[in-house]
Structure formats: structure tokens, C-alpha cells
Amino acid sequence: MTLFDIEKLEKEVEELHEKTLAEGFWNDQATSSSVLSRLKNCQNKLTKYNKLKSELENIIDLNDLLLKENDEEMAKDVLKSSKKLEDEITSLELETLLNGKYDANNAILTIHPGARWNRITRLG
């Protein structure tokens, strides 16, 4: 099982884009808004994925060069870039895991010391 199925996401973007071209699409504001929101979300994920993929390829190239030249400054750059990429991938993974029906909604969590239960209020 993969966490991030790029082919499926690309197919979904294509299908959602086709829906926006359908006759009468703009007549139903609720449906068009939902489709456009999902389309934007999918496109943003693809953009982030492609950016991370490009950054990874750059790090690999730098690492290959580093193995040949043994440059201490370049080694520091590779380590710094690797850590940054790791953080960005972790963020994208979390964003992907929190992609359920209500995960885009805001929530307010109130914690009262000594209380037996906490109350969560959903907004939106």
C-alpha cells in the first residue's frame, strides 16, 4: 500500500478538470465549488510532490559529485538539504493522512484542568 498514489492523483485531476468543462457545470454552485476545491487540493499535492522529487534528484546529484570531490562545504549542503527535504516529506505525509471528509474543517479544542472530559467544537 502506498501513501501517495501519483498516478491515481493525476487521473483524478484530469477527471475533475473534465467535469469543469461539462455543459451546465457552473449552474450548480455547490457542486462546482466542491469540484473546484478538490481540484485545487489535488493540484497542490501534485505540485508539492513534483517539487520534492526535483529536490531529491538534486540531492542525489550533489551526493554523486561529493563522492568524487570530497568537498566539506558541499557535504554540509547535502546534509542541510537532506534534513529540509525530510521535513517537507514528513509534512506532506501528514497532510496526505489527514485528508478525510472533515479534515479540512477547523476545530477548537478546549482543555480544562481537572475536568473529566474535553469538548471539541467544529467550525465550518
Image (cartoon, grey):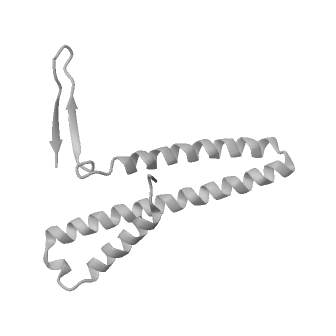
| Residue at the bottom extreme, as displayed | 23
| Residue at the right extreme, as displayed | 69
| Residue at the front extreme, as displayed | 1
- Residue 116 is situated, as x and y percent measured from the top left of the image, at 16, 18
Q: Residue at x 57, y 47 (%)?
A: 85
Q: Residue at x 56, y 44 (%)?
A: 86
**Image quadrant of residue 119?**
top left
State the residue in front, 51 or 6: 6
Above or below, comparing residue 10 to residue 104 in the picture? below
- Number of disc labels: 0
Seen in the image, is 34 located left or right of residue 56? Answer: left
Above or below, comparing residue 58 to residue 17 in the picture? above
Q: Residue at x 44, y 60 (%)?
A: 5
**Image quadrant of residue 122?**
top left
State the residue in front, 71 or 25: 25
- Residue 73 is situated, as x and y percent measured from the top left of the image, at 77, 43
- Residue 101 is situated, as x and y percent measured from the top left of the image, at 24, 52
Q: Residue at x 63, y 46 (%)?
A: 81
Seen in the image, is 18 located left or right of residue 81? Answer: left
State the residue in front, 61 or 81: 61
- Residue 47 is situated, as x and y percent measured from the top left of the image, at 47, 63
Seen in the image, is 34 located left or right of residue 80? Answer: left
